[in-house]
Image: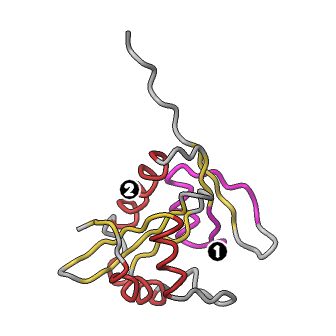
Amino acid sequence: MLRQAVVADVPDMHRVRMSVRENRLVSTIITEADTRKAIEDLGRGWVVEVDGEVVAFAIGNQITGNIWALFVDPEHEGRGYGRQLHDEMLTWLWAQGLRKLWLTTEPGTRAERFYQKAGWTKLGVTDNGEVRFEISKPNEPPERE
């Protein structure tokens, strides 16, 4: 079940974040307080629950247009949860009036391929070696008369 994240989900979101095999945090420490701020003040988060357990989550920043997080527990990969979260998050961010979104990810990962397949444009590599992607809001259909 996909639903909006609440503060009570933050510990489970961190568990999922720390379980991933790629895009592991090595130079940055993200605290539960950072995650609470991200879902309450800066944007919104979503989780996927299976049998009452959070197995995937995403967070989008409505101020900067940054995709702050999108992670799936390795035991639950390949079931479409990442794409469901991605699509829900983008729909919400577009509805907030954003016209362009961006993210960074580790090069050579499944995440890099995921974003390319989802229509993101690879812009290059950041100073810290991550790949930067952007996506623009799709054209709205013309109004009918």
Residue displayed at 64% across by 51% down: 121
How far apart marks 2 and 1 lie (CA) works out to 23 Å
Residue 10 position, x and y percent, is 40, 83
Say if 81 sits above or below 53 in the image. Answer: above
Image mark for residue 23: none
Quadrant of image for the C terminus:
top left
Say if 142 sits above or below 47 in the image. Answer: above
Q: Of helix, strand and loop, which one carries label 2?
A: helix
Residue 83 position, x and y percent, is 39, 60
- The magenta segment: 103-125
| Amino acid identity at mark 2 | Glu
Image mark for residue 88: 2
| Amino acid identity at mark 1 | Glu
Circle 1 Cα neighbour tier, 10 Å, few/some/many (<14 / 14–19 / ≥20):
some
Residue 62 position, x and y percent, is 54, 57
Of the numbered discs 2 and 1, the one sitting upstream in the chain is 2
Circle 2 Cα neighbour tier, 10 Å, few/some/many (<14 / 14–19 / ≥20):
some
Name the residue tied to disc 1.
106
Residue 6 position, x and y percent, is 34, 75
Quadrant of image for the N terminus:
bottom left
> In the image, is residue 110 part of the stretch drawn in magenta?
yes
Say if 66 sits above or below 135 in the image. Answer: below
- Closest to the camera, between mark 2 and mark 1, is 2
Q: Of helix, strand and loop, which one carries label 1?
A: loop
Between 85 and 80, which is closer to the camera in this rendering? Answer: 85
Specify the quadrant of the image occupied by residue 27: bottom right
